[in-house]
Image: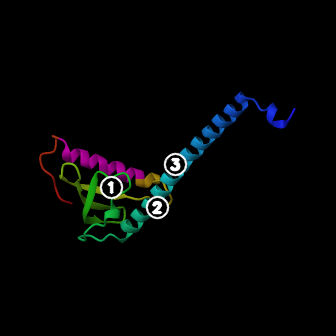
């Protein structure tokens, strides 16, 4: 018997299916890796635009974070402080103007407890100002 006589059809089919499955898994991981690299590059670009933003200037397209750039177009930097940056954006679908406050953690990739408390206070004030209980607002 020769070596070619000992290879059966099920063995060839099994090897082909296994090779195909391996190729599909490799392609999926490649696509996920490419997407993650694009997200990281977009975030770095956002950080550069965020740190360089100045009040009253036209906003860079990169100032809309990766998750928002498909929904809103950045137009103008309304204000910049130590804690964040407020940007006038326009809804791509409806064209309505909105103000978006962008915040980046001071250190690392997560907000510290002090920063979280500040965020919660700002959210509470915004809720109060936009609720029906508020009769008038005061510009601070």
Q: Earlier in the sequence, mark 2 or mark 3?
A: 3
Q: Secondary structure at mark 2?
A: helix
- Which residue occupies 29% across, 51% down? 71
Label number found at residue 69: 1
Left or right of residue 39: residue 50:
left
Q: Main secondary structure of the magenta part?
A: helix
Q: Is residue 119 magenta?
A: yes
Q: Which is more N-terminal, label 1 or label 2?
A: 2
- The image position of residue 139, as x and y in percent, is 18, 59
Would you identify the image quadrant in which residue 49 lies? bottom left
Q: Nearer the viewer, residue 13 or 28?
A: 13
Tell me residue 58's x, y (percent). 25, 69
Q: 31 and 44: which one is in front?
A: 31
The residue that appears at 85% across and 35% down in the rendered structure is 2
How much space separates mark 2 and mark 3, taking CA atoms?
14 Å
Which residue is the extreme one toward the left? 135
Side of 15 relative to 93 (left or right): right
- Per the image, is 70 magenta? no
Q: Which residue position is annotated with label 3?
A: 32
Question: Which segment is the magenta one?
Answer: 116-131
Which residue has dot 2 on it?
A: 41
Q: Quadrant of residue 43?
A: bottom left
Task: Give the foreground label among 1 and 3.
Answer: 3
Q: Residues within 10 Å of mark 1 (few under 14, many from 20)?
A: some
Q: Which mark is residue 6?
A: none
Measured Cα–Cα span from mark 2 to mark 1? 14 Å
Distance between mark 1 and mark 3 Cα atoms: 20 Å
């Amino acid at each position: 018997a020769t070596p070619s006589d000992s290879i059966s059809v099920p063995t060839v089919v099994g090897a082909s299916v296994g090779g195909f499955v391996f190729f599909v898994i490799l392609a999926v991981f490649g696509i996920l890796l490419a997407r993650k690299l694009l997200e990281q590059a977009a975030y770095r670009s956002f950080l550069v635009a965020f740190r360089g933003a100045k009040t009253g200037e036209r906003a860079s397209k990169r100032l809309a974070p990766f998750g928002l750039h498909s929904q809103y177009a950045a137009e103008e930097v309304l204000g910049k402080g130590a804690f964040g940056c407020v940007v006038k954006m326009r809804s791509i679908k409806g064209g309505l103007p909105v103000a978006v406050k962008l915040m980046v953690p001071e250190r690392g990739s997560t907000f510290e407890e002090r920063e979280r408390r500040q965020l919660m206070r700002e959210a509470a004030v915004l809720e109060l100002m936009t609720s029906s209980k508020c009769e008038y607002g005061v510009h601070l």
